Image (cartoon, helix red, strand yellow):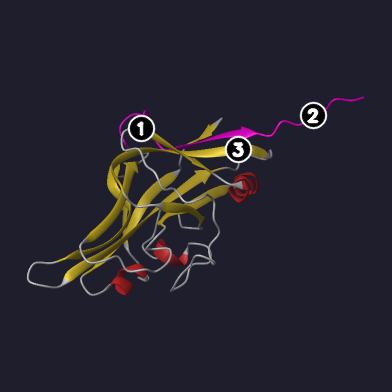
Amino acid sequence: LYLIPTRDGEIRAYNTTNWATSRDASSGTVRINDTLSGSAISAYQLSGRGGGGSWQVKRAFFNFDTSGISDTLSSATLKLYGRSSGSADFFVLASTQHQPLAGGDFGSRINGWTTGDNTSNVTYYSDEITSWSTSGYNDITLNATALAAIKNDNDFTFCLVEADYDLTDTEPSSGTSYNTGFFWSDNTGTSKDPYIDYSAAVTDNAVF
């Protein structure tokens, strides 16, 4: 059994002032209807010519219609077809973003999100993802909290957040860039679409 997204996209906060202005931005630039992204999840600080620099944070958001699921699930795996860089480690975090995405969803719609280190504030739907294929599907195991949300919520929503810098509010070193990319659902055809593969728990109804 599988689910395909009803909406997916990224929100980007970019500036040439400092790390905090990007990371704690109240709103960002929304990108939807894209076919692919080489940096759907991102944290970087790049130095500029003649001094100065630029800072960027990107977060990827997904909505799945789960209104038809009422059974307890035994497993669920998010499948993302990788592209380009895979240097940004990340978590799948619970969120409640609008559909379609709005710029203000950047931080305010990630459950528990605030300024500073959010390691202990957010709701995790996965372990940290630390390896990435750029030429095939990546399997991301969703945890028991995510399985319950898929069963109980009509709209299963989450955000992919860079783990080492964005989540912890740690400024990347100058000249460093951490990006992970993948194909979105608007890519032509379905061979590289994001989806969730899931299984319902088996119940024993035998009568003795």
Task: Give the magenta-colored segment's residue range.
Answer: 187-208
Image quarter hosting the C terminus:
top right
Horizontal and vertical percent position of residue 18: 26, 74
Do tag 3 and tag 1 residues touch (Cβ < 8 Å)? no
CA neighbours of label 1 inside 10 A, class few (<14), some (14 to 19), many (20+) = some
Q: Per the image, is 191 magenta?
A: yes
Identify the disc placed on residue 136.
1
Check disc 2 and report its element: helix, strand or loop: loop
Name the residue beneath numbered marker 3: 75
Dividing the picture into quarters, in which one does residue 173 lie?
bottom left
Horizontal and vertical percent position of residue 153: 61, 49
Q: Residue at x 46, y 53 (%)?
A: 91
The residues bearing labels 2 and 1 have C-alpha atoms spaced at a distance of 37 Å
Residue type at numbered disc 1: Gly
CA neighbours of label 3 inside 10 A, class few (<14), some (14 to 19), many (20+) = some
Which is nearer the eye, 67 or 114? 114
Check disc 3 and report its element: helix, strand or loop: strand
Check disc 1 and report its element: helix, strand or loop: loop
Q: Residue at x 33, y 73 (%)?
A: 20
Identify the disc placed on residue 204.
2
Of the two numbered discs 2 and 3 on the same chain, state the one appearing first in sequence: 3
Left of 69 or right of it: where is 50? left
